[in-house]
Image (cartoon, rainbow, N blue to C red):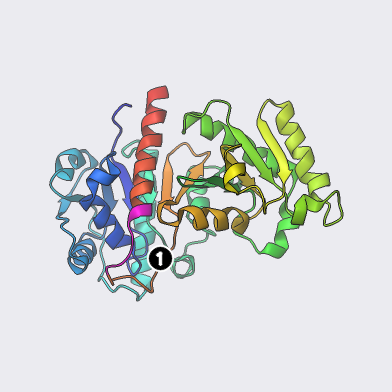
Amino acid sequence: MPAVAPLAVSIGDPAGIGPEIITESWARQSERDGAPFIVLGGAGLLEAAAHMRGTICPIVRIQDPAECGAAFAHGLPVLGLEDCAYRPGQPSDEGAALALGSLAEATRMALLGKAGGVVTAPVAKGQLAKVGFEFPGQTEFLAAACGLPTDDSVMMLAGPSLRAVPVTVHCSLAEVPGLLTSELIVSKARILAAALTKDFGIKGPRIAACGLNPHAGEDGKFGSEERDIIGPAVNRLREAGIAVSGPHPADAIFTPRARKTYDAALAMYHDQALIPLKALDFDEGVNVTLGLPIVRTSPDHGTAFDIAGKGVADPSAMIAALRMAGEVAARRASHD
């Protein structure tokens, strides 16, 4: 695959495990084996995080993304003067402001073509809201930054064992039946199918749609959403030439045998997708935003304030997110 521009990494909440798993990811380059990356801001706290953990990760302050290639061989390139004190496990407004600025700058670099993609470290959404963040999550922020409606972006969770997409995402469980429509399911499935082909190189991708209710409604006995909303959406997708099956009972579709029959599962709500993904691939799960003009991935876990600074955070999901972003960026570049 062709070489791509460096990836832009947002630092996440500096009181969480982001700084230590970022520096550890640089130190374990042989495991990642992909595009070089730049962190936006936080040079001092990254140095402190590496020192706390005993990670050998020199910090190289750069002034231009073009310097990344030469710098990456010697240390972790950091662009920008924004910084704050390293206080693991103690979130603050100062740290949230750094996280938001880092996310915005990483996104800007990708939109300008100065970065091959964006990899976001975990943030605390409630903490970000205190400094003016008006979005439910980073996925919605990125969609807006790209000039797209929220529904035009799709959150896919991907690991070695499973790819899963929730149709409804950051809402209460009580709201899900009212938010589900055939149009929404069709839209998400179309974006998913296109991304599986373009970004993951899967020809003729197979998608398995989950039901919402127990036993996929059992012909209306346990709910009508399968009959009235999900089933018609599946039929429309099949008529459009997309290989979609279902609706399947969600308690059976994630078994080892069932997972061999599809390339991605289309779940109806957040936990229906994330529980099996995290049960199967917690340490290597990646959050991928599909449907954007830029590449974006993130480790599929949170800030983990309770273990931040203790040197025990596993960097595997961050390494997997960096690897996947580089692979997707290279695959897109090969088609341009």
Q: Which residue is under mark 1? A: 303
Res 336 seen here: no
| Residue lying at the far bottom of the rendered structure | 90
Left or right: 158 in relation to 171: left
Image quarter of residue 172? bottom right
Other-residue count near label 1 (Cα within 10 Å), few / some / many at <14 / 14–19 / ≥20: many
The C terminus - image quarter: top left
Left or right: 25 in relation to 294: left
| Secondary structure at numbered mark 1 | loop
Magenta segment includes 316: yes
Magenta-drawn segment: 311-317
| Residue lying at the far front of the rendered structure | 257
Left or right: 109 in relation to 168: left
- In terms of depth relative to the viewer, which is nearer, 142 or 252? 252
Q: Amino acid at mark 1?
A: Thr
- Residue 23 in percent (x, y) is at 24, 56
- In terms of depth relative to the viewer, which is nearer, 111 or 305? 305
- Residue 182 in percent (x, y) is at 75, 42
Q: Residue at x 38, y 66 (%)?
A: 96
- Residue 14 in percent (x, y) is at 32, 66
Q: Residue at x 54, y 60 (%)?
A: 136
Rendered view: 283 above or below 253: below
**Count of numbered circles on the image:** 1
Q: Which secondary structure is most common in the magenta stretch?
A: loop
Magenta segment includes 189: no
Q: Residue at x 21, y 43 (%)?
A: 64
Rendered view: 91 above or below 285: below
